[in-house]
Every structure is written in structure tokens, then in C-alpha cells.
Image (cartoon, grey):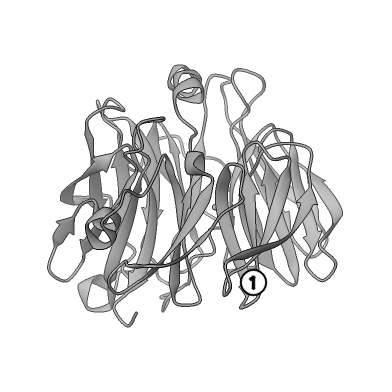
């Protein structure tokens, strides 16, 4: 996995507050299946510099997949490197990294509603109100503040390095600063960095569990240090528990959580699953990757189905595998080039 990250770092602008709107929950983790499902938007990076980024859309009711949806609905290409997408305020925000923009589309037909420009290399979007949202960035050394209604940039927050996923909780924005070993704590009233939380090297993903504890996954960098998974109390800003991965050669990423807030999932070549009350990291995979290159992970908040993206060879069209909550494969979807991001839209949208 370390080898692939080195290659991708120079060939792709890889893969935010993925503030996915959360649907109905079951505390036992059992699925709701299709009657509570909707559309699964699959972000496909495309090849860096080729301008062939795309989104695929899977309908859980009809079990049909449509590819190149943005282009077909708007008669223009999406852009270069589809990084992430975020459902907020009834709209879908598509962060297109190397095209320096965010496309805003209608969730019903995926037609363009607007565009946020003036960004350097947007990674992830986190909306907190109808007039304020935040965008992390690969190269800007800043978090951009935008208005998600007017699509205008309204400010910036200076940071020290590349920033990735965010989590909004209790009037504070928690930002993973991937180029360092920090989680930034931003006061959204003042837009100032109020504090920092020291974690492992290169934090890349963040979730909140049923106990309102944050979990932050750190890759450890490229053979720099041991990867780590931290449980953090967001009220005291203290690290309560640290799980260290056994090898410096591992690169875990894409931390996700189920709708009940009890089961964590992440990619470490294969997909692993652990309960938030577990005392150790899982020793065996939940889903084995076999010959596949698992490159993206999503858990539907409406069905608890697990979606895993297979980049195949980073050149040809990729695949997405759907699994039930027991880890049994239920669907294989043919999608765009280098799939890696998932956003789940309920049918009521």
C-alpha cells in the first residue's frame, strides 16, 4: 500500500467534513435495505491532468447505475480530479480538486445550480449554516470560508499544511491537518484556531460515534511512523485512547462509521471493522481485498450497506462492490475511472 501511495502522490491529487446528512438509525446495526435507501453518488477521480473526472449514480430501488451523470445532465465535463462530494442544505457540492472549483448540483437531476471558484486545490466541504461553510485545501495553506447559498468565498483561515476531512461538533470545527500530526480546533464564531490536538502522523479521516467521541485515523506518513487510531473527547480535547498499528509499512485510511455510531470501518489494503468498545484493533479483515485495490469506502446511513471502491489499475474504469452488514457481497457496479468517494442521498430529496 505504501508503494501505491508514493505513485499516486505524483500522479494524482488524491482523495471531507464529510458532513453527510444522517438518516434514521438502528442501535443494533441491522440494515433498513432498499425501502429506506436512495441514490448513491460515487465520485470518480479520473486520471490527473486528463479532465475526465466523473460521478456515477446508483439507484438502490432500481439497482441501476448511471455513469458520467454530471456531463450528461449539463453537457459539459465535470473537470479534473473529482475529490469528494457533500450533501448539504438539500444540494450536492462536488469538490473538483485540480480544477480549483466546487460544482453545486440539484440532487434530483444533478443539473448545475452554481459554482464556487477562486479555490486553490479543494479537498473537502463542511457546511454549518445557510451562510457559512468551510473548504480544506491541498496547497493553499488555508481553509477557505464560503457562503453555500451565494457560492461566494467570504474569508480564509491560515493553517500550516495540507488539510483534509473535517467534523463540526458543539460549535467547533475539527480539521485533520494531514501534513502534520495535528487536529485543528476552530471556533466557528471567530474563525480562529482555538486549539490543537496532537495525534499520530498524517491524520486523514475523522468520525463521531454514538457516545459523542471523535475517532481520528492517522496513516503514519510514507514509512515515517506507526499508523494510529485515536479516540478523542471533543469536549476536553483530550486523547482518551490510542491504538497503534503493528507495522510502519501500513497506511490505513478512509475511516467510516455505521448509522448507529457503534461500528468503525477503515481500509488497510483490506476493509477492517471494529466496535467502538473494542480494546484492540481487529486482527483479521472484515472484507478481504484479494487482487483488488481498495481505494474508497462508504457506509450507507440508510441501509448500512458497505460500498468499497476498486481502482483496479488507476487507468481503466473502476468497480464498486456492495456488501451487507455481514460482509457478504451483494452487488458489483461498473463505474468511472478511479472511484473513491461516496455520498448517500435519500429518496425524499
Seen from the viewer's position, the closer of residues 344 and 110 is 110
Residue 232, picture quadrant? bottom right
- For mark 1, give the secondary structure: strand
| Residue beneath the point at 32% across and 53% down | 42
| Rendered view: 97 above or below 247 | below
**Count of labels shown?**
1
| Rendered view: 344 above or below 316 | below
| Residue beneath the point at 50% across and 21% down | 10
Q: Residue 131, position in %: x, y?
A: 65, 75
- Residue 344 in view: yes
| Residue beneath the point at 59% across and 20% down | 222
Seen from the viewer's position, the closer of residues 199 and 101 is 101
* Extreme residue in the front direction: 75
The C terminus, quarter of image? bottom left
Callout 1: few (<14), some (14-19), or many (20+) C-alpha neighbours within 10 Å? Answer: many
Left-right relation of 175 to 98: right
Which residue is label 1 attached to?
Answer: 128
Left-right relation of 261 to 133: left
Seen from the viewer's position, the closer of residues 329 and 13 is 13
The N terminus, quarter of image? top left
| Rendered view: 250 above or below 157 | above
Left-right relation of 270 to 179: left
Residue 127, picture quadrant? bottom right
Q: Residue 134, position in %: x, y?
A: 65, 60
Q: Residue 327, position in %: x, y?
A: 27, 50
- Residue 208 in view: no
Q: Residue 91, position in %: x, y?
A: 44, 72
Seen from the viewer's position, the closer of residues 329 and 139 is 139
| Rendered view: 283 above or below 306 | above
Amino acid at each position: 500500500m505504501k508503494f501505491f501511495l508514493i505513485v499516486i502522490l505524483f500522479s494524482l491529487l488524491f482523495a471531507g467534513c464529510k458532513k453527510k446528512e444522517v438518516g434514521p438509525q438502528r442501535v443494533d446495526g441491522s440494515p433498513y435495505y432498499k425501502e429506506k435507501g436512495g441514490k448513491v453518488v460515487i465520485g470518480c477521480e479520473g486520471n490527473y491532468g486528463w479532465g475526465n473526472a466523473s460521478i456515477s449514480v446508483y439507484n438502490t430501488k432500481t439497482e441501476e447505475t448511471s455513469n458520467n451523470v454530471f456531463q450528461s445532465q449539463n453537457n459539459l465535463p465535470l473537470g479534473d480530479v473529482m475529490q469528494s462530494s457533500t450533501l448539504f442544505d438539500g444540494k450536492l457540492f462536488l469538490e473538483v480538486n485540480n480544477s480549483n472549483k466546487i460544482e453545486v448540483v440539484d440532487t434530483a437531476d444533478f443539473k448545475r445550480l452554481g459554482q464556487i471558484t477562486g479555490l486553490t486545490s479543494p479537498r473537502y466541504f463542511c457546511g454549518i449554516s445557510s451562510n457559512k461553510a468551510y473548504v480544506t485545501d491541498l496547497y493553499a495553506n488555508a481553509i477557505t470560508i464560503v457562503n453555500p447559498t451565494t457560492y461566494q468565498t467570504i474569508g480564509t483561515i491560515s493553517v500550516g499544511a495540507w488539510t483534509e476531512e473535517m467534523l463540526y461538533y458543539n460549535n467547533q470545527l475539527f480539521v485533520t491537518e494531514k501534513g502534520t500530526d495535528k487536529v485543528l480546533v476552530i471556533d466557528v464564531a471567530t474563525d480562529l484556531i482555538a486549539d490543537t490536538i496532537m495525534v499520530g502522523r498524517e491524520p486523514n479521516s475523522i468520525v463521531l460515534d454514538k457516545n459523542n467521541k471523535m475517532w481520528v485515523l492517522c496513516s503514519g506518513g510514507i514509512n515515517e511512523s506507526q499508523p494510529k487510531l485515536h479516540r478523542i473527547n471533543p469536549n476536553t480535547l483530550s486523547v482518551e485512547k490510542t491504538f497503534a498499528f503493528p507495522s510502519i509499512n501500513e497506511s490505513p485510511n478512509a475511516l467510516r462509521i455505521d448509522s448507529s455510531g457503534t461500528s468503525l470501518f477503515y481500509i488497510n489494503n483490506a476493509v477492517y471493522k471494529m466496535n467502538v468498545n473494542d480494546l484492540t484493533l481487529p486482527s483479521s479483515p472484515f472484507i478481504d481485498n484479494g487482487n483488488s485495490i481498495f481505494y474508497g469506502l462508504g457506509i450507507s446511513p440508510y441501509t448500512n450497506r458497505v460500498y468499497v471502491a476498486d481502482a483496479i489499475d488507476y487507468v481503466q474504469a473502476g468497480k464498486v462492490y456492495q456488501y451487507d452488514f455481514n460482509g457478504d457481497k451483494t452487488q458489483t457496479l461498473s463505474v468511472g475511472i478511479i472511484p473513491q468517494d461516496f455520498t448517500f442521498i435519500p429518496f425524499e430529496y
